[in-house]
Image: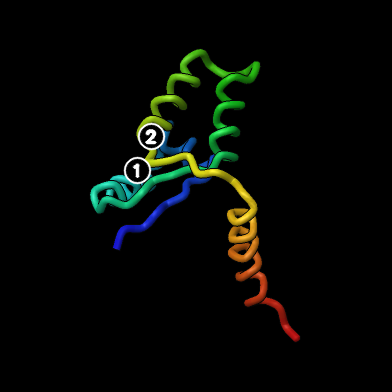
Amino acid sequence: MNKTYMLDTCICSFIMREQPEAVLKRLEQAVLRNHRIVVSAITYAEMRFGATGPKASPRHIELVDAFCARLDAIQPWDRAAVDATTEIVIMPMSVFTTT
């Protein structure tokens, strides 16, 4: 079964810096298994803002563009995505809630 991995901004940053090695190996394994590698529109926006800000290096935008070109998709961040994320985030919290 193929999976979809949605990367957050921090993981994307690690990958573009090519470290730590464990993250790169995990990504490589996912790609070899034909899993989809995607980011959300929010993550894409954060990477673009970081690449064009006043402290950004001139090569940063090139790295972001090259990284995004290798992704399977940049997913929209619509209402359904927000609702699904909310459910995932509150699940672990309910494990620690006592009655």
Contact check, label 1 and label 2, Cβ < 8 Å: yes
Whether 10 is drawn above or below 81: the answer is: above
Q: Residues within 10 Å of mark 2 (few under 14, many from 20)?
A: few
Residue at horizontal 31%, vertical 58%?
Answer: 2
Measured from the top left, where is residue 61 in percent x and y? 49, 20
- Work out which quarter of the rendered image holds the C terminus and state it: bottom right
Measured from the top left, where is residue 55 in percent x and y? 62, 18
Q: Residues within 10 Å of mark 1 (few under 14, many from 20)?
A: some
User: Is 62 or 73 nearer to us in this picture?
Assistant: 73
- Marker count (numbered): 2
On screen, residue 99 versus residue 3, left or right, reads right
Please name the amino acid that badge 2 sits on. Glu
- Report the disc number at residue 75: none
Q: Residue furthest right?
A: 99
Q: Residue furthest bottom?
A: 99
Please name the amino acid that badge 1 sits on. Leu
What is the spatial separation of the Cα atoms under label 1 and label 2, in whole angstroms? Answer: 7 Å
On screen, residue 54 versus residue 60, left or right, reads right
Which residue in the structure is indicated by mark 2?
A: 18
Quadrant for residue 48, please give it.
top right
User: Is 1 or 47 nearer to us in this picture?
Assistant: 1
Of callouts 1 and 2, which one flags the residue occurring earlier in the amino acid sequence? Answer: 2
On screen, residue 94 versus residue 8, left or right, reads right
- Secondary structure under badge 2? loop
- Secondary structure under badge 1? helix
Which residue in the structure is indicated by mark 1?
A: 24
Quadrant for residue 97, please give it.
bottom right
Measured from the top left, where is residue 96 in percent x and y? 66, 76
- Work out which quarter of the rendered image holds the N terminus and state it: bottom left
